[in-house]
Image (tube, coloured by chain):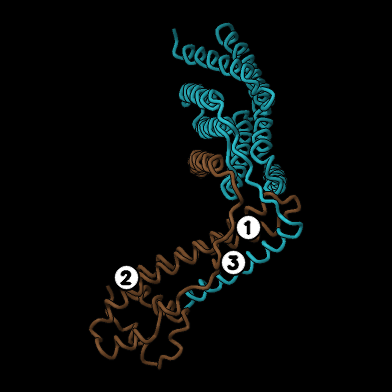
Chain colours: A brown, B cyan
């Protein structure tokens, strides 16, 4: 048990050493070529997502009313969009954290506990977002359920009656 | 000539060459702990080789005593790596101090726990296991440094990167081989010897490659932050992160 643990830990370490040294080297090259102003988040880079348009309830209603046979294709498309939405959220958070770390690493009076809290929150968010993305792509019940939840997250199923979510769950699995 | 001697001589030659490089390029002033470490290993290696051919029993004693010295000097090298990697990033350096202190407290608590669990005597008896634990602690400290370098996107210069990669590789091979040696005993002895020596030769080549070029150190990318900018940015980031996390959790619920 101890041997396996140590070997696994050591292998991880050596992988980390090479990966980080390579990444740090790339950064060093970038730093020397762009020794300019520090990075700032893109203007308007907030967590506001374009979900309201993406998950518009009108599309879903239209499909159910006019072409119910396309429900499956519609859900498949929505899955791809949900994936893009999650990816965009991750990118946005990554940029916010990048800007924060640029300030934090140069600040003498940095708070270790606040940094630890932020780092933990960041990794939890990243893990949860990746998990959600994985679930969205799962065929069958879980994937479809999550597509519906994604729609809910976009506040777009509020105007739905009781029938629509059931319809969504009843749609055939990919 | 025995294969052990061939590797041994390669080690000496490479180590001597690296020492000359450090001196000629004035890198010894920048990495004094590393230079002292190399010089000590160089001297210890020559003494060991002498006893290896003369008296095997004495060689074993000399080996373990000198190995402790080398392992202790390794900690100084690690400290130097921390210092150079983070010296231009005071915020990250503060975090590193907290992290290293926490790791040492953790290691101390673990040692106390082992003492009460009756494993300490076993460790004292087994020199190999003790050295493995020292190397293990170094590996953890190195991993913490690498984590900070990655998380805070600290750029590294060529020489520092070479030292980090070479030392990381050497520690990794040491932890693995010492674990296997203490687990399998004498049956792994010859493998252990060859693997340790070969890994050291590889580490030396990586170090030479790092010290050889005289690439300029990357400029520190430090922001000239206003007095309260850190606090404001941290609070804003925390809020944004909490909102994003909540939205994902809502998605995952149900």
Image spot of residue B229 (x, y percent): 71, 59
In space, the residues marked 1 and 2 are separated at their CA atoms by: 38 Å
- Classify the position of the N terminus of chain B by image quarter: top left
Image spot of residue A58 (x, y percent): 37, 87
Mark 2: give few (<14), some (14-19) or many (20+) Cα within 10 Å: few
Quadrant position of residue B66: top right
The residue located at (64%, 28%) in the rendering is: B71
Front-most of residues A89 and A167: A89
Dot 3 corresponds to which residue?
Answer: B241
The disc at residue A139 is: 2
Mark 3: give few (<14), some (14-19) or many (20+) Cα within 10 Å: many
Mark 3, mark 1: which one is toward the viewer?
1
* Chain at numbered mark 3: B
Image spot of residue B21 (x, y percent): 59, 18
Front-most of residues A32 and B114: A32
Front-most of residues B189 and A112: A112
- Relative placement, left or right, of B219 versus A160 is right
Does any portion of residue A39 appear in the rendered image?
Answer: yes
* Chain at numbered mark 2: A
Dot 1 corresponds to which residue?
Answer: A100
Quadrant position of residue B49: top right
The local secondary structure at tag 1 comes to: helix
Say which label, 1 or 2, has the lower sequence index.
1
Mark 1, mark 2: which one is toward the viewer?
1
Depicted A71 relative to depicted B158: above or below: below
């Amino acid at each position: 048990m101890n041997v396996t643990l140590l070997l696994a830990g050591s292998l991880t370490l050596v992988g980390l050493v090479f990966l980080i040294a390579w990444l740090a080297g790339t950064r060093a090259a970038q730093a020397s070529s762009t020794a300019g102003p520090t990075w700032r988040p893109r203007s308007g880079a907030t967590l506001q997502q374009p979900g309201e348009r993406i998950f518009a309830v009108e599309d879903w209603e239209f499909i159910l009313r006019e072409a119910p046979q396309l429900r499956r294709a519609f859900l498949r498309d929505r899955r791809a969009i949900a994936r893009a939405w999650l990816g965009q959220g991750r990118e946005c958070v990554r940029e916010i954290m990048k800007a924060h770390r640029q300030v934090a690493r140069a600040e003498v009076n940095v708070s270790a506990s606040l940094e630890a809290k932020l780092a933990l929150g960041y990794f939890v968010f990243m893990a949860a977002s990746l998990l959600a993305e994985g679930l969205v792509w799962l065929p069958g019940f879980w994937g479809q359920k999550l597509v519906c939840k994604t729609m809910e997250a976009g506040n777009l199923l509020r105007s739905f009656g009781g029938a629509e979510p059931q319809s969504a769950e009843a749609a055939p699995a990919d | 000539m025995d294969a052990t001697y061939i590797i041994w001589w390669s080690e000496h030659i490479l180590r001597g060459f690296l020492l000359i490089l450090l001196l000629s390029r004035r890198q010894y002033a920048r990495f004094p702990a590393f230079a002292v470490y190399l010089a000590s290993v160089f001297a210890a290696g020559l003494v060991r080789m002498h006893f290896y051919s003369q008296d095997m029993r004495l060689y074993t004693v000399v080996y373990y005593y000198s190995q402790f010295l080398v392992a202790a000097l390794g900690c100084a090298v690690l400290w130097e790596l921390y210092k150079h990697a983070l010296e231009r990033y005071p915020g990250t350096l503060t975090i590193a101090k907290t992290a290293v202190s926490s790791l040492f407290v953790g290691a101390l608590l673990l040692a106390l726990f082992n003492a009460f669990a009756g494993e300490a005597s076993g460790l004292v008896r087994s020199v190999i296991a003790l050295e493995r634990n020292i190397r293990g602690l170094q590996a953890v400290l190195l991993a913490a440094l690498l984590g900070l370098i990655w998380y805070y996107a600290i750029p590294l210069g060529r020489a520092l990167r070479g030292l980090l990669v070479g030392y990381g590789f050497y520690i990794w091979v040491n932890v693995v081989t010492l674990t296997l040696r203490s687990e399998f005993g004498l049956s792994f002895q010859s493998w252990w010897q060859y693997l340790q020596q070969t890994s050291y030769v590889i580490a030396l080549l990586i170090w030479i490659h790092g010290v050889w070029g005289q690439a300029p150190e990357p400029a520190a990318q430090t922001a000239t932050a206003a007095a309260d900018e850190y606090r404001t940015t941290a609070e804003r980031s925390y809020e944004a992160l909490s909102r994003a996390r909540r939205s994902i959790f809502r998605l995952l619920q149900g």
